Image (tube, grey):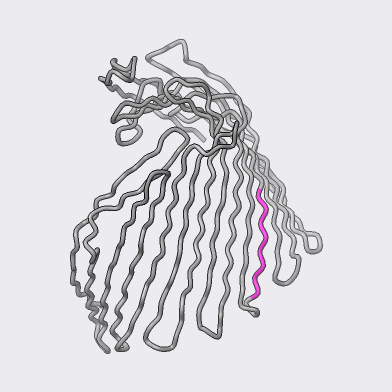
Amino acid sequence: MRSQDKVLSSMELQSPNEVKNLNKVYTNHFTYQNEIGLLDIQESFRWKKWRFNVGGTTQIAQVRLNNKKTIERNFQRNQLLFQPTLAVSVQLSDHQRLMFFYYGQQSLPSSEQFNEGYIQSSYRSFSRNVSQFYVTQNNNLQLNYNNTNWTKLYAFNLGISHNQNYFVNTSNFAFSELLSFDEQQPIATKLGQWSANCQLDRLIALLSTKIRFEGFVSQSDILNRVNGSALLPNYTQNFNGKIYAISAFDFPLNFQLSTRLNFNRVMNRSDKKEISSAKLFVPSVILKYQPLPKLTLRLTGEQLNWYNQQNRDVTNLLDLDIILHPEKSLWTFSMRGNNLLNTKAIYYTTVSNYAIFQRNYLLQPRWVSVSANRSF
């Protein structure tokens, strides 16, 4: 397997006074290629209620960098890479299953790692790297438990994961009033991440309603610098939860009610104090009404509540759909009313370990559309 990337870019930055040493032309002009030969071995076997899968991949890579700008950084080298895998599962009962999975991965750097000159990475954001060859190491452990018994009208799934990365990129952020600059540099250290997710489904036959809960929680280590500071040993915590009920009545009116909560915060690893946080709370409802067998009205409403450490922003949204499919007809007629409350914008806040972002997303004004479709 062979891949080759040729990068040629040139950018002139004229920076404000508060960001120093950026008034110059930044260029990238290099060719990065690698040739990889691999050997993959997998073996599976069963023993009673147990199932095993053991294997791995060995890669021999030849890597070359031809940098036209800084010749002293050119190199050619051979690299041996390993990617072991192990999967074990056991059937605990007719309805319960437990699974364990491990994989390790060694990866070559991408061509982006050799962008010594700034490139535009996103709107108002610029980034560059310290050109250096290194191999990243990733280890991942996963444990999953599943319990499904539709005879008793429930299903439950729980997953736990731990991920560890070695030799990772750290970012040195610099900011002006409108722009951000990110200089990435590899560092020989370990950063960890763990997460857990679960899903529970329960059918309430008496009410003809299905209840579902979905949850996800994670914590990730981060190392960055801001405006030339020392390394900031922080970590982020995230929680996403949603619970909703879906009806399946025999009469014309049905509903879907849901509540969603997203919570994110950045913590200082040294003193365990919160640096920044933001949360989103969204209750929503969908009402479906069929006054006639071929006529459907669907009303969708939700309220977005964004909270940060300073204030709260509330946005209300409402849409209406009307669909008519005449009996024994190939035609379908529909009308859609979008943003019926004529909401102007959605205001929201996101946080990271180096900045708090407050943004607004402008919405299209209230509008109504009518359409007709024919099947052939």
Q: Position of residue 360 (x, y in %)?
A: 29, 47
Residue 180 highlighted magenta (yes or no)? no
Compared across the picture, whether 59 is left or right of 17 comes to right
- Above or below, 32 relative to 218: above
Q: Nearer the viewer, residue 185 or 314?
A: 314
What residue is drawn where x is 40% and y is 20%?
A: 116
- Above or below, 352 relative to 254: above
Residue 146 highlighted magenta (yes or no)? yes
Q: Main secondary structure of the magenta part?
A: strand
Compared across the picture, whether 91 is left or right of 37 comes to right
Q: Nearer the viewer, residue 3 or 284?
A: 284
What residue is drawn where x is 28% and y is 20%?
A: 15
The magenta region covers 142-149
Quadrant housing residue 310: top left
Q: Nearer the viewer, residue 266 or 371?
A: 266
Furthest toward the top, the residue is 72
